[in-house]
Image (tube, rainbow, N blue to C red):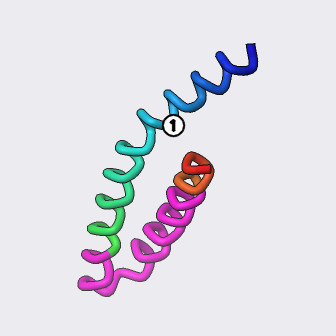
Amino acid sequence: MKQVIQTLKNTEAERRIPVLRLEIDYELATLHDALVEKNPEQIKRSKKKLERLRQEMLQLET
């Protein structure tokens, strides 16, 4: 039973990681635009979201 649960978790991680990478790429582009526009509110939101995405990626990779 433990092996089945572990296999399901691995499958979910394998599906989520590519989507997460796309989300990170998109948010990096958003952050870049905010930096160019000198928009401090958007910069703060993007950094916060990128930190959350980074934490999720770290959890999935371990």
Relative depth, front residue between 42 and 23: 23
Give how far across and how far down residue 52 sits, in percent. Answer: 56, 58
Taking the spot 38% from the left edge, 59% from the top edge, the residue there is 24
Taking the spot 58% from the left edge, 56% from the top edge, the residue there is 58
Task: Say if the magenta span includes residue 1.
Answer: no
Relative depth, front residue between 52 and 17: 17
Name the amino acid, label 1.
Ala
Q: Which residue, as the protein is rendered here, is positioned at the far front?
A: 3
Whether 35 is drawn above or below 22: the answer is below
Give how far across and how far down residue 36 sits, in percent. Answer: 24, 85
Q: Which residue, as the protein is rendered here, is positioned at the far top?
A: 1
**Placement of the N terminus among the 4 image quadrants:** top right
Q: Main secondary structure of the magenta part?
A: helix
| Mark 1 lies on residue | 13
Report the span colored magenta.
Answer: 32-55
Relative depth, front residue between 11 and 33: 11
Is 35 positioned to the left or the right of 60 in the image? left
